[in-house]
Image (cartoon, rainbow, N blue to C red):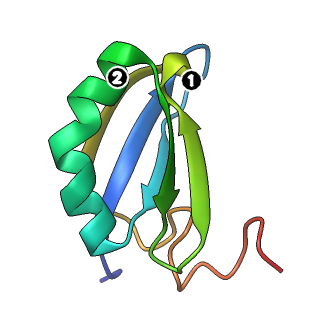
Amino acid sequence: MPETRPGLVLHLAGASQPLHIALDPAEADALRDVLADLMTNGHTKSLTTADGGRFAVNFAHVATAHIEATRSDAYGAPARGTGFRN
């Protein structure tokens, strides 16, 4: 069974599939407290991914977002081994 970790699921305006981002557990806990405000105000926030990288989200372009136990192949997951980092 794949490993799961807290992650952010973004449904972007104009995109048919959601984007799954594996988050650092502390980042996920902090984000739970401010996610509704970020969505309401359309702010941009830089997040720490589970692999230690950074990921910027412009919430003005997000239709809906939530935090859940995400897949091990989500962007930013240590096991993924691909993405924007070299």
Amino acid identity at mark 2: Met
Q: Position of residue 20 (x, y in %)?
A: 46, 51
Q: Which residue lies furthest to the right in this view?
A: 86
Q: Which mark is residue 58?
A: none
Question: On the rendered image, what quadrant is the N terminus found in?
Answer: bottom left
Query: How many tags in the picture?
Result: 2
Q: Mark 1 points at which residue?
A: 16
Secondary element under disc 1, as helix, strand or loop, is loop
Q: Position of residue 68 (x, y in %)?
A: 23, 53
Q: Where is residue 77 in the image (x, y as percent from the top left)?
A: 50, 75
Q: Name the residue under label 2.
A: 39
Q: Residues within 10 Å of mark 2 (few under 14, many from 20)?
A: some
Residue 15, placed above or below residue 24: above
* Residue at position x 27%, y 36% in the image: 35
* Residue at position x 35%, y 28% in the image: 38
Residue 34, placed above or below residue 48: above
Secondary element under disc 2, as helix, strand or loop, is helix
Question: On the rendered image, what quadrant is the C terminus found in?
Answer: bottom right
Image quadrant in which you'd find residue 30:
bottom left
| Foreground disc of the pair 2, 1 | 2
Horizontal relation, residue 42 to residue 17: left or right? left
Q: How crowded is mark 1: few (under 14 residues within 10 Å), some or many (20 or more)?
A: few
Horizontal relation, residue 15 to residue 19: left or right? right
Image quadrant in which you'd find residue 36:
top left
Going from N to C along the chain, the mark reached first, 2 or 1, is: 1
